Image (tube, helix red, strand yellow):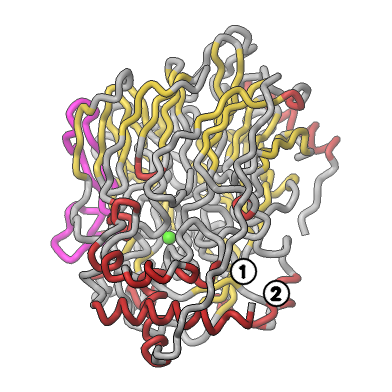
Amino acid sequence: MFSIINLTNGFATHASRVRTLVAIGCAIAALGGAEAQTVGWPMHGGNANDARHSELTSIDAGNVGRLGLAWSFEDFVVRGRTHRGMQATPLVVDGLMYVTGPWSVIYALDARTGKLLWQHDPQVPGGWARKACCDVVNRGVAVAEGKVFSATLDGYLIALDARDGRLLWREDTLIDRKRAYTITGAPRLTDKLVVIGNGGGELGVRGYVSAYERDTGELAWRFFTVPGQGPDEHPEVGVARATWSRDSRFEFGLGGTVWDSMTFDPESRLLYVGVGNGSPWPAWVRSPGGGDNLYLSSILALDADSGRLKWHYQTTPADSWDYTATQNMILADLRLGAGVRKVIMQAPKNGFFYVLDRRTGELLSAQPYTDVTWATRVDPVTGRPQLDASARYEHGQAIVAPSIAGGHNWQPMAFSPRTGLAYIPVLTEHMTFVPWRDGYRPDTISVEARVADPAKTGDQDLLLESRWSAPQSVLVAWDPARAKSIWHGPVRPWWGGGVLSTANVIVQGGSDGLLMVHDATNGRVLKTIAVGTAISAAPITYAIDGVQYIAVVAGLGGSIKTFPWGSAALEHENSERLLVFRLDGGPLRLPPRVTPKVRRAPLDHSNIDAAKAARGSQLFLDHCGRCHAPNGIPNNYPDLWNLPAAAYAAFETIVLRGALEHAGMPRFDDVLSPADVADIRDFIIRDDALSRGTR
Ligand code: CA
């Protein structure tokens, strides 16, 4: 179990270390008093260290009780009636806020008032939603030299004039537009270039990262993270190839997508890149002859100018559990033992918190920050995890923690140089992995995996050993110098929110629709604001003319397929919102309450053949179930079990001919026949009628 340390002793220890840290100049641009200051949030992680910490002090533990709404913006582009996930980190530069919403739309607002100054809709084809594992979300933009750089779901990198949103250039970043490539991540900047990766590791693509000239959009370099079917594009691909078996399934792309985190260190001029999971997930399918499968689940340090690899560290060799190393990375100078080390820190999905020397990649520490069963430890000498045999699932099911959601996902953690602590939005969940059954198809999710259910699998003992009852989310304060947890916040519903550190407080939302402010030293909850909308994204902070603001986007979606127990989306309509707070702000309007669903009468199913419905059930799982939940379980997408009869008659027009494509319902006529669609429809109508008595 976690224990909360003696706060008096703990604080004294931290205070002395903080003084040291500040003395050596590690503290992030100390800004002093915020009065009459105008301070932006110019980079994705707030500053060059990507620490998501601000030294603004107008809002602190002493006055945060006065926090209220300054302004909100809710006029996000919604296609059809389907709300989508909100994941962006807003940037604030020169008094303007640049934020993104679903469908890669960019909004520029007056950061003091919320007035919309311009918006740019890149008109992403609605059918591209089918290529997205995890919704048509977007995590934000980069801003430099009067340009806003953003990437679109359908793979374009664009540059806009920051003043008026005028399109300056647009580049296609995809190497194969037939594959399921998407971009949901924010571009990042080196001192000269703009860099972007992509997603698709669940759906059969080959990962890479590309750097472009900021003025022209010309490609400067490209680094492939896994070997391909053709000749090696650069020497590192050859090095990687030696860690894959000859019979690897190159036709499936092999994964390794760079879908979120990258950070540039101006001092070493290295660009750190977080690499995702393999495609498909099971290593024995992907690379039947074994091997570590570089550079999956790795942190890469690339020369920022040339894209050449300086070092790499693989967090999960031969990963089979979707343990991406794409989670956010933070740079810091840490006192470790007798000396101060320049480190990079990451809490990837695999459950270990890594501290590496950021110049060499040397492992300095790796300890579990949540329940971990797949490995017993990370060997400090070799840097390799020692696998636990219980996590293998080639020949039978295995219950593994963390789950495919990870101990920590894209919701960013923060690091405060004041306390020397990292603040991790931790996810706790065990998951049952079951062995491969069908042949792999690039347009379906890679492997069956499900949440461990003690009632069905007899896993009570395992769940009872959990630090928290699963699945939940919890904020953990982690001391990277001592490689241990210091405190944790209250246990909250599944799928927590990203974290902001400012002055001596920690700000985090959650799917419960609560924005919580904690004391950074001991986790005490100082203020809770009910916003009525689930918050997954991380808050930011900025100041204009001495007034400090805290901003966060809200709206549940992304990889969440059904609204979790305890989430605000079960109570209030899950619309997209941007909420900005300040001291002595006003009250907040909650979204309308969810209207109770009226079930229509069951439709006649007497002529529906059971065998055809069973076939329809499998087709539904393969092609529809990534978005639509079965049987009226609440989520963002239309309830196919409760459609008016006329809508079923229109199924073929919708599913095969794209009648609702603009709204994000793609056409499937390349993989489904009219007979397939009829079977899916019949399965739904029959299942709806037969299940009436069971609910
Ligand atoms: Ca993944």
Q: Position of residue 442 (x, y in %)?
A: 29, 70
Task: Note whether residue 548 is visible.
Answer: yes
Question: Which residue is depicted at the point 30% across and 20% down?
Answer: 164
Q: Position of residue 677 (x, y in %)?
A: 31, 76
Question: Quadrant location of the N terminus?
Answer: bottom right
* Above or below, 14 relative to 444: above
Q: Where residue 430 is drawn, which disc sits there? A: 1
Question: Which residue is depicted at the point 24% across and 75% down?
Answer: 246
Q: Nearer the viewer, residue 43 or 479?
A: 43
Left or right of 275? Residue 384 is right
Q: Are marks 2 and 1 in contact (CB under 8 Å)?
A: yes
User: Please, what is the three-letter code of the amino acid marked with disc 2?
Assistant: Leu
User: In this figure, which residue is indicated by the disc labeled 2?
Assistant: 462
Left or right of 692? Residue 558 is left
Residue at disc 1, secondary structure: loop
State the extent of the magenta-drawn residues as a range: 209-238
Task: Note whether residue 20 is visible.
Answer: no
* Disc with the residue nearer the chain's start (2 vs 1): 1
Question: Which residue is depicted at the point 19% across and 44% down?
Answer: 172
Q: Quadrant of ligand 1?
A: bottom left
